[in-house]
Amino acid sequence: MNIILLGPPGAGKGTQAQRLVERHGMRQLSTGDMLRAAVKAATPVGLQAKAVMERGELVSDEIVSALIGEELDAMGPETGAIFDGYPRTAAQAEALDGILGQRGRSLDHVIELDVNEDALVERITGRFTCANCGKGYHDKFEQPKVAGVCDKCGSTEFKRRPDDNEETVRTRMAEYRAKTAPILPIYETRGIVSRVDGMADMDQVTDAIEQVIAS
Ligand code: ADP
Ligand code: AMP
């Protein structure tokens, strides 16, 4: 099973991908996470991507598509893939077809998380993650069960993303509208797009995604 979670920043892609990983043993392929790891490790890719990410603009198609190919090669052929934050442009969508085809894979579902943009700034500025295991949280919508302690791994260290500020979020949303939303029709013509209400409770969103996957 290979699925794309599509939606603007803050739509809930990472939250839902983490749940699918836990429930189905699929693998989350987040180009944002890969790029942040590259920035942290100061690799050549990281050095190139850092300033672009800080501005909220898109990193080059070649860089992110290469990262996706490497990540798929590191997975067993039976492990399902959840693409989170990729593809983000028509060129990336085309590249993904080739990357999957070369590896004997094909796309099963593109799940669009349909959200009201007005809610996204609040979602993003309240977002934080466990510094140890990466579990996602929110100041208002998903706090750890015990304050200051990660539910999943018990760590007491948390972090926030430098690009999760209101100004950068506006640029990221504009990038989504201009470059990412237009790729939906490509997948609609193939009949693989399902729309899920991303404004519902997290558990309801998960249920709706499960229904799509089971269909
Ligand atoms: P994305 O990966 O699409 O950028 P996230 O999954 O990181 O988005 O979600 C952004 C923030 O919103 C996180 O802090 C998350 O806890 C919260 N969130 C995700 N889904 C919902 C939801 N359905 N309702 C309320 N808050 C949500
Ligand atoms: P995300 O974690 O998906 O919100 O991505 C964070 C940032 O990484 C984005 O604002 C972009 O600068 C960069 N990025 C992540 N994925 C891609 C992609 N598929 N194409 C281009 N840039 C990306």
Image (cartoon, rainbow, N blue to C red):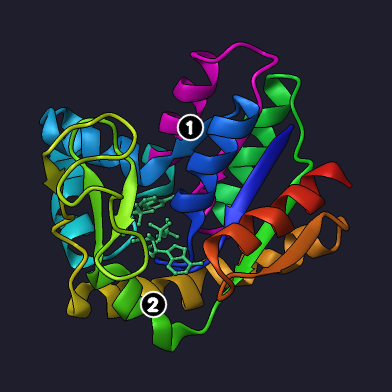
Q: Which residue is mark 2?
A: 120
Please rate how many residues cluster around mark 2, counting C-alpha atoms within 10 Å: few if below 14, some from 14 to 19, many from 20. Answer: many
For mark 1, give the secondary structure.
helix
Q: Is residue 52 above or below residue 122?
A: above
User: How far apart in space, not on screen, are marks 1 and 2 (Cα)?
Assistant: 26 Å
Please rate how many residues cluster around mark 1, counting C-alpha atoms within 10 Å: few if below 14, some from 14 to 19, many from 20. Answer: many
Q: Which residue is mark 1?
A: 68
Q: Quadrant of residue 44?
A: top left
Of the residues shown, which amino acid type is indicated by label 2?
A: Leu
Mark earlier in primary sequence (1, 2)? 1
Q: Is mark 1 within 8 Å of ligand 2?
A: no
**Residue at image x 68%, y 30%?**
100
Can residue 76 be spotted in the picture?
A: yes
* Percent coordinates x, y for residue 134 in the rendering: 29, 38
- Residue 78 is covered by the magenta coloring: yes
* Percent coordinates x, y for residue 203 in the rendering: 59, 58
Of the residues shown, which amino acid type is indicated by label 1?
A: Ile
Q: Is mark 2 within 8 Å of ligand 1?
A: yes
- Residue 133 is covered by the magenta coloring: no
**Residue segment shown in magenta:** 64-90
**Residue at image x 67%, y 13%?**
77
In this rendering, position of residue 139 left or right of residue 205: left
Q: Nearer the viewer, residue 150 or 21?
A: 150
Q: Is residue 174 above or below residue 12?
A: below
Q: Is residue 102 above or below residue 91?
A: above
